[in-house]
Image (cartoon, rainbow, N blue to C red):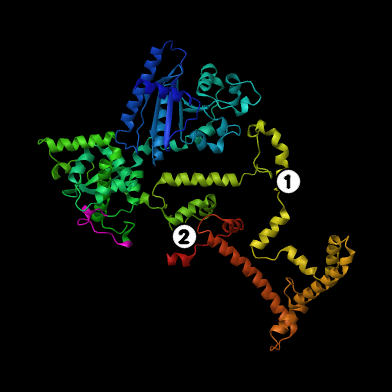
Amino acid sequence: MENIKDEFQGFGKGFVDFPRRLPEDCVEYTLYIINSKLQSQKELLTRLEAVRKEAVKLMNNLLKDYIWQRDSFSLELESGKGMMYLHGTSSYGDSVDDEWLIVYLLKELSRAFEDLWIKVIDTDGEFLLIEAANALPRWLNPEIADNRVWINKEKLRIIPLSAASNTSSTTRTASVSHSLTIEEGLRTITSNPEILMNSPLIEAEAFYRLRNYPAQISASLHHSLITIPRKLAFVLHSMPSTIAPAIEAFYLRDPVSLRPLQLASPELIFPPIDLVTVSVKFTKVLYAQLRSQRFSIPAAWKDIIAQPKEDDATDISLEPNHKWLETGMKVTSGFEMFITDPKNGDNRKVREIKIVLEDLAEDESLELPTDEEIAKWSDVRRADDEKWLDINFEDFDRELQGSKQDKEASINPRAFGPDRPSGFGDAKTESDLKKIVERFEAFLNDESAGVDGAELDDMDIDDDEDDLDEDTEEEDKDVSFDENEFARMMREMMGMPSEEDKYQTAAFEPATTKASKIGRIREVNADEEDKEEEAAELRKVMQRMEAELNEAGALNLDPTPKKLATLKSRLNSAESNSATKDVAEENSDEEVDIDLNLAKNLLESFKSQAGMAGPGGNLLGMMGMQLPRDEDDLRST
């Protein structure tokens, strides 16, 4: 075994510099103590232990009743490369609120310890800078942002480019393209902390999602009444946090985990007998995951719960008792899948649940709670409002319109009666959506941007590619923008006659055609005088074809009154109307046909977008037009 371990360590040594990437939906946090007064490792260890104890105390005060989606916030003492620090990694799954709760806890710890420097990243890297992207200086791009962003004394502190020359190589591009290592970042903080920058604007953007904490902690929870077996009610009352992995097992179910529920007479851990209705605590993310899922009734539940009708798929029209029973069936099924799935055999919470169930089966003194005992539980009949689940489409669309709608409403706020309630049950969601729209409008309305578009800094230019400049210049010439060609293509897409067609129509006169054709033939057959007779014959054939087509009006995209009258008289020889009247009607019809063709193409382009973004919707939006949804499609669906 020792030889195997040695071989494995030797294998790992070859990958020391290999870039490490966090798993999906994970946040990593590292806490360092930088204090020149600490003279020994023992003093540093004592200081780090004090930070860890403060973190536990903070969690007990703020998160006593909180339910984590996956992993909770935890700190472990680690050491490496001559450093000692606290480190933790948490998986937050679909609950982004868990990630920001961890940031809030770290920020609170930095307030309690002034010599504490905190680095936090997730799968995307420096996500605090991503949040503040709208306020970042142009030099701070993802390529050089590693290990430059720190939290200290509740402030967001950034190591500037000027600090790179002291810790990196002295090459010309070091201060521009160099990404700091963790050792270089800590060395800069230790030797020259006053050089770090703190921008209130960047900080406000980066910590924007923390504005409602700590109140957001309780606001993210939801209580709902559900009907479940008495045994499961006892487990949930004893271990409320087990609801999270059970719902995730239900939400991410697969055929293997569903197999015990699909049997005709399964031996269930929580059979649907001795049912009780109790209030269960969820997070809003967990409850939304539970309610959003369509789930076929397991065999053991078919005699207890009726299959809902198609009209009741949204659960809005269901009776409360039926909804409690259906939700309880999903929760119970989630616990069955979570406990019986072989891949969860080593899960700590699975082992804890099994211990509780074994104690109930073996210890005769332990009995399930009676109805009277359940009635004494705290908040046993609590049911929170579920309006936050509902988002009105019209209100959502109105919020997407941004400040334009706000200005219209401010002119006459009660023109349509009393103020309508927001279509968002969650004020946080509404606020975040408004912020997205404001940022997008600010980007579109940025008057400082020139006609050349985005400007490049020196850091955006790779010095290693100087030898490719000549090739790229030639390629740029090949793909340069041609305004005339673009205009022609746009006119063809909209069904309008192109300028080229008009010029060709005007050029279809015998003399002009003759001269152009002769020019082409002479250019091709300049050295072949013996073929002049063939060329002349070819010209005669082309002239006859041109005259015949022109007489029929096939080549005329801009017809003259004379030709229109001739064509009209041929097609309608039985009519006795005057030629002038026919020309006027034909001209008006021609204009209508062009407008109708353009409108038809625009509408078809808009409809083909199927509600998504596209060229038709963009063109209409720039013209200030907004088309309604297709009512025929709505009726058909």
| Outermost residue toward the right in this view | 529
> Looking at the rendered structure, which numbered label has been put on residue 477?
1
Work out which residue is located at the far top of the displayed protein and give it. 39
Where does the magenta region start and end?
Answer: 297-310
Q: Nearer the viewer, residue 362 or 19?
A: 19
Q: Position of residue 446 (x, y in %)?
A: 62, 44
Query: In the image, residue 37 lies at what x, y percent?
Result: 45, 12
Q: Main secondary structure of the magenta part?
A: loop
- Drawn side of residue 451 relative to residue 183, left or right: right
Q: Amino acid at mark 2?
A: Phe
- Give the mark nearest the N terminus, 1 or 2: 2
Q: Give how far across and how far down residue 435 sits, in percent.
A: 50, 44
- Residue 249 is covered by the magenta coloring: no
User: Residue sitting at 24 percent across and 34 percent down?
Assistant: 351
What is the quadrant of residue 539 in the picture? Answer: bottom right
Contact between labelled residues 2 and 1, with CB atoms less than 8 Å apart: no
Tell me if I can see residue 54 in this picture: yes
The quadrant in which the N terminus is found is top left
Task: Name the residue beneath numbered marker 2.
Answer: 416
Question: Quadrant location of the C terminus?
Answer: bottom left
Inter-mark Cα distance, 1 to 2: 57 Å
**Identity of the residue drawn at 18% across and 49% down:** 275
Is residue 509 visible to us here? Answer: no
Please rate how many residues cluster around mark 1, counting C-alpha atoms within 10 Å: few if below 14, some from 14 to 19, many from 20: few
Q: Which mark is residue 66?
A: none
